[in-house]
């Protein structure tokens, strides 16, 4: 919960705030705010009394752009929302429009989408894990994570030509079929990648210092998480067994056998930073499982057959959500029957997850704020849109 | 010869920085110039062949007391007392008395015929002998000092703790 | 008490495990690609700087319409009936002079949306990504092959032709009222093909014309 | 003046002592007063060591000086703890103001 | 010649001279172009809020306070350490006593919590509503019966 | 439960309120000054238990009305509901649900920032994405981009 | 060494200054090497290459860095306390360099052969504390001040266990002089402190080694533990990972030197690296026999060339020192960092009690066994 | 007034070789301010990660602008952020350089038309030395831009320019 200045003054008047408290700025240029977030920390000594997030330093007017574009043209902009998980963003948007238009997708498209989405999830989690380690002061795991992420990007690049922002999943299909040797590339990657998980576990996740820094920090109880609408690893870290891929199934996730990872409080309390972090680590393995299963039954086919010539959804509205690496990404699309969407609202998981930071960081030290922020794993592009 | 020069260097360092300590406008300047006073005094100790005491001086005064003083200055700093309020009223009589004392002292020192018994400490340095003295003649004070410090730790911690309880909650 | 010692033990043990990992990497071959000397092999689908093969461009403006960022500016002038522009390699007949074809590569978001609708496959993404500039204006790529004078001329021609036709039309209108409806429809069709009417206000920047050629090595 | 003798040290220590006293008597900031005390203790130590060097006090002077240092540290610790205490309760460490507050 | 301390003194002077030289050379080369904005304190690009002065964390102070006493004790331990072999058991006992006293001091501080960093009570936020958390956690077990209504926590509205 | 059932349930609970059911979308339309009451009921009712507000969006319907759309979900029952509030553009006051679902706090700030819906009772209704001194509500259909902001030219 | 210089230049002040400036030369070279080492080692540990384009394999990168820093503008922020802001780097480097006075680089070279070398080292370290405080205060920046306070509290706290480790070694050797401490460990490497201290001179063939060494076997774990602890305190005193919270990028931007730029920053940088070597060298001196060759013999002895012996000894010390510097770097790129309260916990509740315990035991054993 | 503040009317051998050495040192040790704004920042990170390793060029990321030489503006500069970018630039010690990475900071990129809250090019607030195109530029593209910047630094001259072009590295 953020507070206005008046509220602060109110607090002072009520004696809750001692006048000699200090306001420290973290960001917008700060190594650990993961971009251009600004946190105003009200400190008492080293302890945090209040965290006041200031957003909008990366407000790029996505929703305005969406209204000015035709339906396919919006897709590159969805890429740029959560730029660490561009595939998943595409996926959600394409899904929304497809549902609005009632398009049935070919099998192969669904398979490719799932594989790509899961690869992207791994890539995104790798960044999250690496930067979290960096926040705690370990630089090396970050580079190991980035190294492996690079292999995923190579696969993406071979398939669709771009490294970061793909514009790959189109309404009704994909921009390209996968490249030759895709299956082998992915298998190779997974083979190469599994040991890295162990390595990062050794180097970082089970390191005593790391555990000390993250266990019992920023505990997010279930009720708060639900009320704040937290989702993804944030919610699962608190022990809630909820994953949209299973509980609100889309695409073909219901065909695969995998597990929803939840925080168990192994190192401290359920819902602390360590749990959130580890949920990501475990999810990477689950993603590998999904990908492997998908590759087993990878069907042939044409990926462009369902792409409509003209994309003009009928008048109507829809809210679809998909499980992004960061949580529930929802698109609320209103169509007025024209070629441009009437309104697109994106409900970004980071936006919602970040709103809880004030609740869970009070009473912690500055160093813990860094840990908490890192464990929320925000992407500013999606928060500010 | 070198001794003479060094003596004047250290003496000057000591006296000048001590002046700054007393007359500096800002408290933090006083505190930091105390650093140089202590260093000068340590230098004088060395010239007096008290090597152990000199090093102890640096360690305790600079490493400990000075830091504590600086922390104290920071802790109690308020927007208003960057400039220290010195009651001007008192300066005149006080300094008059002090300067008078100083003059008297210096006069006395000059007048006194000191019989200089120069006992140069051994080349080995003083630490060994000091240790022996501590372990023999002064063993009781040595232990008492230990107890004293224990009590001080307890006392200081107690005072510091108590006020925390009284104001923080 | 046991936790106290266990914590100390864990601290030391896990630190040693970590040290083992990093020490091991000291002897692992590094993955660095030494960029200017060694280059990453780019896959064929790679999406970097756009290139337009002007020989094939029919000036249909499809690419500019598809572009979400509007960074393609195309201006065309209708060719005179007696001018033969030739055919594209895909066999489409060219009917328009492309007087201006600018891509502001600085604005482009490399989405590739412009590539798909092109009927002659003449706009495509190349492998070249190394084109940093000291000056932002150098990032505007002008693909039109005509010199400014030529372009002006073509435009004037088209203008004149249009006027003539208009005049003809008027005359015809007066003369033949019968076929009015049919003729008008035909006329309309013509206009539509013409695309945007040429904007006389903007003339292409002189001296930049051949840049695009020079740059795409 | 070239041969440095006892007198020189004594004079330095006298000046230091007087400056300490001056700090004590004119400045009313508790921390600064503490600094004054440190100056005085230092001057005393100079004397002790000077005497042990020139007056045959020998290493006993050193031991004494050592204890003085110890005492100074203990004194500083306690005094600053008290200063802290006063500051937290009175929000000032000006001796005059504290007196005024007491009344 | 100077004593060994004299040499140490030369080291000190040399250290100063080196810095002075370095800065001098830099001064000869470097540009100097202060502007108002450049001279503002750095605060992540924001306008500095409030006083640059912060409330000082008392814990640092207490640490210094405790340290100074340990420091002094260490000063006393050094002479002891070099002579005790000469004197033997008696000296050992004297010194050991001293160390034990130190031990006690440390232990006292430990027991009394003076060494704990001030960590204000970590407030675990609560936002009660009717969600049954236990059920949420057990959700995978589809057959688990929902808890009855009265088992739920009280509603908090505002 | 589908939307129809929920509507019936709510209509029975709040006979005084003019709840409407929009069969097309489908959603329940709630008067702006009752949303909080209804929201509490939606959240806490045994059968509804819509404890999670997935999304709250402000919409400019371009016909002189603004709307706020609430997408609700129940973690336990795993059902969803869409609730709408429609207000005239001249007087865009809606009750806040910030204290019903905490996540509404930022969402409402965003709707206020971009669309200009004013949420009565919100404790901290500031702009969230645009700078605090920004003028206008950019997602209104009639929004015009300012020429300058703080001395910086805005258009290209 | 001194006599050599004297014979060359005569017995005057210049000789002495030159004599004292030798470590400065070494320090400069070392700093260049260490900076390069830091980036290169970290790079290799992370599957990278590190600087490659400045000279072959980037070996003159540090030189370029230094030259670049010379050209950087020197900013003194408006609100900063100009005098103290400028003074702090002087003090910081001075403290670092003054400590080098007592480091014996060989049996024939030690800057100032103080009888209370170990004690002097501790004391001079506190000047650094004052410098950091000064820098933090004078910068008038929140991050700086926070960084400085943390740094000071950290260094000051860890001084206690560090001093206790010194006391332990001194207890055993009975002298504060570093040369004495090293000489006591002379002979092959099993005489080093970390392996339980000097063994009685037993002929290898006589089979009495075991008999004479059981004492050392008792000491071995004690000294091993003290070595580890001393090294940990050393890390803390140099603000290196995992104790780098004063400079923690992710929290405090760059700690007390946030506002420093150009050459002044370089000076802090230098003194940090100097302190790193200092800690490593002292570790080597206290526990790893200082300049003693691990084999107990010197090439120079064979040729009867004292200068060669001196050089060898210098080489061994530097080698050992650099090895420990390497370990510091290695640790830095391996471990995450502790939080400020955990740091204090570690110091006051782990290291200090342990060090007291070890001191008591070692003292007892020394009295009983020797 | 240091040497770098001065401008000489004509150079001599000493000056040019000194200048050469100084320029070399500067270009080999361009320390980067770790400062990412948006998607491009990820590619900037990728450029310093193992595969591309920008450190090969002697780049060291420093968190404080006081110790940096180059600011890489990687990402979308919004109006809210623009003043901060400007301030950070101002707070860097001279000589300082700016690399604009990606379409957004070059000219607003994909947001140039409808982005009411996007600054259309960072060159409106700070002087840019090198524009790296791309959205996002590949890490290699950033490296190439970096080399262009190095060339620019190499050409810096203490001798008064004849053609009146402004000197780089100065505001
Ligand atoms: S790649 Fe995308 S942004 Fe670039 S010109 Fe083509 S359509 Fe436009
Ligand atoms: S779509 Fe192709 S042919 Fe048409 S204008 Fe563009 S480049 Fe030319
Ligand atoms: S240029 Fe492209 S990749 Fe870079 S910040 Fe802008 S939108 Fe993102």
Image (cartoon, helix red, strand yellow):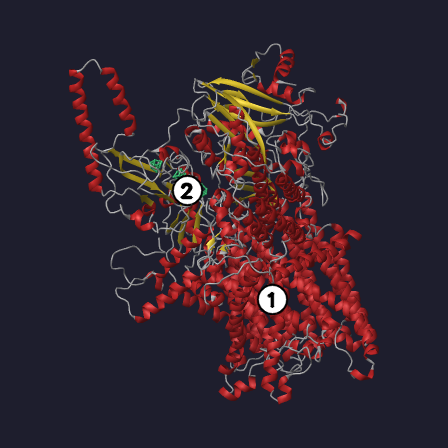
Q: Is residue E118 above or below residue G86?
A: above
Q: Is residue B4 above or below residue E151?
A: below
Q: CA distance from mark 2 to mark 1?
A: 44 Å
Mark 1 close to ligand 3, CB under 8 Å: no
- Rendered location of residue A274, percent (x, y): 67, 44
Q: Quadrant of the rendered structure where residue D102 is?
A: top right
- Rendered location of residue G95, percent (x, y): 56, 67
Q: Is residue A195 above or below residue C74?
A: below
Tell me which residue sits at (33%, 33%) in the image.
C61
**How many labels sit on residues?**
2
Q: Chain of mark 1?
A: G
User: In terms of secondary structure, where does tag 2 sit?
Assistant: helix
Q: Quadrant of the rendered structure where residue G198 is?
A: bottom right
Q: Chain of mark 2?
A: H
Residue topped by disc 1: G325
Badge nearest the viewer, 2 or 1: 2
- Rendered location of residue A287, percent (x, y): 63, 41
Q: Is residue A342 left or right of residue B7?
A: left
Q: Quadrant of the rendered structure where residue A329 is?
A: top right
Nearer to the camera, G140 or E33 = E33
User: In terms of secondary structure, where does tag 1 sit?
Assistant: helix
Instruction: Specify few, some or many for label 2: CA neighbours under 10 Å numbering under 14, 14-19, or 20 or more.
Output: many
Quarter holding ligand 3 = top left
Residue topped by disc 2: H104
Q: Is residue A254 left or right of residue B137?
A: left
Quarter of the image with the N terminus of chain A in it: top right
Mark 2 close to ligand 3, CB under 8 Å: yes
Tell me which residue sits at (79%, 84%) in the image.
G203
């Amino acid at each position: 919960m953020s507070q206005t200045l008046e509220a602060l003054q109110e607090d002072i008047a009520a004696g809750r705030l001692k006048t000699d408290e200090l306001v420290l700025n973290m960001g917008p240029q700060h190594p650990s705010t993961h971009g251009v977030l600004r946190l105003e920390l009200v400190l008492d000594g080293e302890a945090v009394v209040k965290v006041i997030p200031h957003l909008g330093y990366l407000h790029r007017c996505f929703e305005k752009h969406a209204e000015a574009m035709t339906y396919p043209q919006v897709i590159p902009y969805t890429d740029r929302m959560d730029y660490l998980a561009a595939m998943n963003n595409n996926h959600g948007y394409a899904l929304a429009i497809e549902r609005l238009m009632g398009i049935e997708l070919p099998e192969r498209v669904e398979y490719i989408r799932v594989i790509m989405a899961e690869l992207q999830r791994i890539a995104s989690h790798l960044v999250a894990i690496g930067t979290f380690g960096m926040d705690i002061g370990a630089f090396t795991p970050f580079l190991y994570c980035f190294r492996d992420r690079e292999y995923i990007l190579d696969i993406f690049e071979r398939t669709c030509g771009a490294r970061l922002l793909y514009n790959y999943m189109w309404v009704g299909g994909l921009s390209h079929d996968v490249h030759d040797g895709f299956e082998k590339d992915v298998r190779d990657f997974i083979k190469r990648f599994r040991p890295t998980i162990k390595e990062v576990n050794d180097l970082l996740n089970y390191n005593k210092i790391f555990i000390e820094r993250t266990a019992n920090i920023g505990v997010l109880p279930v009720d708060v998480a639900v009320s704040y609408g937290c989702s993804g690893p944030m919610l699962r870290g608190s022990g809630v067994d909820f994953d949209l891929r299973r509980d609100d199934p889309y695409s073909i996730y219901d065909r695969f056998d995998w597990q929803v990872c939840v925080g168990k409080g192994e190192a401290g309390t359920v819902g602390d930073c360590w749990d959130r972090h580890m949920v990501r680590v475990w999810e990477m393995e689950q993603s590998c499982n999904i990908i492997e299963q998908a590759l087993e039954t990878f069907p042939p086919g044409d990926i462009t057959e369902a792409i409509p010539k003209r994309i003009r959804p009928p008048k109507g509205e829809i809210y679809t959500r998909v499980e992004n690496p960061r949580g529930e990404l929802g698109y609320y699309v209103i169509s007025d029957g024209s070629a441009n969407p009437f309104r697109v609202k994106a409900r970004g998981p980071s936006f919602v997850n970040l709103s809880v930071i004030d609740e869970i960081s009070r009473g912690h030290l500055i160093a813990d704020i860094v840990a908490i922020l890192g464990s929320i794993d925000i992407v500013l592009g999606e928060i500010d849109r | 010869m070198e001794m003479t020069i060094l003596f004047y260097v250290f003496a000057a360092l000591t006296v000048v920085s001590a002046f700054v300590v007393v007359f500096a406008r800002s408290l933090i300047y006083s505190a930091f110039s105390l650093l140089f006073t202590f260093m000068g005094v340590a230098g004088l100790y060395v010239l007096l062949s008290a090597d152990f005491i000199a090093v102890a001086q640096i360690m305790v005064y600079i490493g400990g007391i000075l830091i504590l003083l600086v922390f104290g200055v920071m802790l109690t700093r308020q927007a208003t007392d960057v400039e220290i309020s010195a009651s001007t009223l008192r300066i005149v009589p006080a300094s008059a008395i002090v300067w008078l004392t100083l003059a008297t002292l210096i006069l006395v020192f000059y007048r006194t015929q000191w019989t200089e018994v120069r006992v140069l400490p051994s080349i080995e340095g003083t630490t060994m002998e000091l240790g022996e003295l501590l372990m023999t003649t002064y063993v009781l004070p040595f232990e008492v000092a230990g107890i004293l410090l224990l009590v001080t730790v307890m006392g200081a911690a107690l005072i510091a703790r108590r006020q925390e309880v009284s104001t923080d909650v | 008490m046991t936790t106290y010692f266990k914590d100390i033990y864990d601290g030391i043990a896990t630190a040693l495990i970590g040290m083992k990992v990093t020490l091991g990497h000291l002897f692992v071959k590094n993955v660095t690609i030494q960029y200017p000397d060694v280059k990453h092999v780019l896959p064929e689908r790679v999406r970097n700087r756009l290139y337009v093969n002007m020989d094939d461009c029919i000036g249909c403006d499809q690419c500019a319409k598809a572009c979400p960022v509007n960074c393609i500016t195309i201006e065309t002038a209708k060719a005179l009936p007696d001018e033969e522009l030739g055919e594209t390699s895909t066999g489409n007949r060219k009917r328009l002079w492309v007087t201006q074809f600018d891509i502001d590569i600085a604005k482009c978001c490399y989405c590739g949306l412009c590539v798909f609708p092109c009927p002659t496959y003449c706009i495509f993404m190349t492998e070249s990504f190394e084109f940093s500039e000291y000056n932002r204006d150098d990032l505007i790529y002008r693909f039109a092959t005509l010199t400014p004078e030529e372009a002006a001329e073509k435009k004037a021609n088209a203008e004149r032709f249009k006027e003539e036709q208009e005049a003809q039309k008027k005359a015809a209108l007066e003369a033949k009222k019968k076929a009015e409806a049919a003729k008008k429809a035909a006329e309309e069709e013509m206009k539509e093909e013409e695309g945007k009417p040429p904007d006389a206000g903007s003339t292409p920047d002189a001296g930049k014309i051949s840049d695009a050629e020079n740059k795409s090595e | 003046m070239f041969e440095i003798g006892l007198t020189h040290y004594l004079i330095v220590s006298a000046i230091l002592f007087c400056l300490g006293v001056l700090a004590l008597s004119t400045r009313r900031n508790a921390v600064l007063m503490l600094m004054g005390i440190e100056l005085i203790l230092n001057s005393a130590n100079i004397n002790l060591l000077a005497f042990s060097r020139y007056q045959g006090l020998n290493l006993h002077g050193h031991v004494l000086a050592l204890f003085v240092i110890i005492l100074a540290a203990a004194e500083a610790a306690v005094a600053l703890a008290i200063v802290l205490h006063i500051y937290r309760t009175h929000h000032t460490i000006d001796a005059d103001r504290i007196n005024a507050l007491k009344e | 010649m100077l004593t060994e301390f004299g040499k140490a003194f030369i080291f000190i002077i040399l250290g100063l001279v080196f810095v002075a030289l370095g800065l001098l050379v830099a001064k000869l080369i470097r540009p100097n172009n202060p502007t108002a904005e450049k001279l503002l304190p750095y605060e992540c690009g924001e306008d500095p809020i409030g006083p640059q002065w912060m409330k000082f964390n008392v814990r640092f102070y207490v640490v210094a306070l405790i340290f100074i006493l340990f420091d002094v004790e260490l000063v006393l331990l050094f002479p002891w350490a070099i002579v005790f072999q000469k004197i033997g058991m008696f000296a050992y006992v004297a010194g050991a006593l001293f160390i034990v006293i130190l031990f006690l001091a440390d232990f006292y501080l430990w027991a009394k919590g003076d060494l704990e960093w001030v960590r204000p009570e970590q407030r675990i936020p609560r936002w009660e509503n009717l969600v049954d958390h236990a059920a949420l956690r057990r959700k995978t077990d589809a057959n688990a019966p929902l808890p009855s209504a009265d088992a739920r926590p009280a509603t908090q509205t505002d | 439960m589908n939307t129809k059932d929920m509507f019936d349930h709510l209509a029975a609970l709040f006979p005084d309120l003019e709840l409407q059911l929009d069969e097309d979308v489908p959603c329940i339309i709630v008067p702006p000054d009752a949303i909080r009451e209804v929201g509490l009921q939606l959240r806490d009712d045994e059968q509804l238990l819509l404890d999670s507000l997935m999304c709250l969006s402000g919409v400019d319907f371009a016909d002189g009305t603004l709307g706020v759309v609430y997408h609700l979900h129940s973690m336990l029952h795993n059902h969803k509901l869409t609730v709408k509030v429609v207000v005239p553009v001249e007087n865009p006051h809606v009750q806040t649900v910030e204290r019903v679902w905490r996540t509404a706090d930022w969402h409402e700030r965003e709707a206020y920032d971009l669309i200009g819906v004013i949420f009565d009772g919100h404790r901290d209704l500031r702009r969230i994405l645009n700078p605090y001194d920004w003028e206008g509500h950019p997602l209104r259909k009639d929004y015009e981009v300012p020429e300058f902001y703080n001395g910086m030219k805005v258009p290209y | 060494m001194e006599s050599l210089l004297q014979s060359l230049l005569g017995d005057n002040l210049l000789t002495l200054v030159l004599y004292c400036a030798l470590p400065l030369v070494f320090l400069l070279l070392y700093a260049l090497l260490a900076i390069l080492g830091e980036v290169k080692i970290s790079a290799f540990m992370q599957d990278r290459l590190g600087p490659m384009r400045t000279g072959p394999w980037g070996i003159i990168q540090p030189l370029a860095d230094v030259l670049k820093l010379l050209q950087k503008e020197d900013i003194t922020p408006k609100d900063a306390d100009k005098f103290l802001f400028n003074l702090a780097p002087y003090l910081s480097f001075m403290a670092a360099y003054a400590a080098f006075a007592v480091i014996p680089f060989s049996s024939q070279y030690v800057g100032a052969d103080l009888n209370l070398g170990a004690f002097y080292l501790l004391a001079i370290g506190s000047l650094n504390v004052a410098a950091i405080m000064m820098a933090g205060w004078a910068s008038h920046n929140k991050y700086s001040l926070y960084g400085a306070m943390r740094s000071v509290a950290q260094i000051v706290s860890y001084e206690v266990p560090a001093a206790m480790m010194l006391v332990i070694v001194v207890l055993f050797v009975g002298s504060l002089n570093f040369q004495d401490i090293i000489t006591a460990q002379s002979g092959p490497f099993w005489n080093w402190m970390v392996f339980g201290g000097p063994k009685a001179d037993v002929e290898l063939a006589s089979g009495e080694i075991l008999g004479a060494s059981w004492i050392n076997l008792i000491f071995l774990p004690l000294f091993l533990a003290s070595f580890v602890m001393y090294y940990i305190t050393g890390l803390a005193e140099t603000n290196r990972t995992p104790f780098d919270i004063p400079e923690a990028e992710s929290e405090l931007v760059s700690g007390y030197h946030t506002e420093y730029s150009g050459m002044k920053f370089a000076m802090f940088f230098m003194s940090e690296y100097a302190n790193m070597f200092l800690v490593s060298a002292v570790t080597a001196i206290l526990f790893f026999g200082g300049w003693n060759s691990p084999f107990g013999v010197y090439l120079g002895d064979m040729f009867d060339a004292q200068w060669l012996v001196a050089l060898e000894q210098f080489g061994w010390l530097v080698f050992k020192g650099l090895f420990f510097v390497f370990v510091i770097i290695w640790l830095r790129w391996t471990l995450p960092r502790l939080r400020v309260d955990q740091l204090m916990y570690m110091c006051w509740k782990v290291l200090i009690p342990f060090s007291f315990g070890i001191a008591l035991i070692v003292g007892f054993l020394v009295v009983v066994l020797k | 007034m240091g040497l770098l503040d001065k401008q000489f009317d004509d150079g001599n051998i000493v000056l040019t070789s000194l200048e050469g050495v100084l320029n070399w040192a500067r270009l080999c040790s361009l320390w980067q301010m770790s400062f990412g704004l948006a998607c491009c920042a990820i590619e900037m990170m990728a450029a310093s990660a193992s595969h591309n390793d920008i450190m090969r060029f002697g780049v060291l990321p420093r968190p404080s602008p006081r110790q940096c030489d180059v600011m890489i503006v990687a990402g979308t500069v919004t109006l809210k952020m623009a003043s901060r970018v400007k301030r950070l630039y101002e707070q860097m010690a001279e000589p300082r350089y700016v690399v604009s990475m990606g379409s957004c900071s070059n000219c607003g990129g994909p947001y140039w038309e409808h982005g009411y809250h996007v600054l259309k090019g960072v060159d409106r607030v700070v002087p840019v030395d090198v524009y790296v195109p791309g959205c996002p530029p590949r890490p290699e593209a950033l490296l190439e831009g970096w080399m262009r910047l190095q060339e620019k630094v190499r050409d810096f001259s203490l001798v008064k320019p004849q053609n009146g072009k402004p000197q780089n590295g100065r505001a």
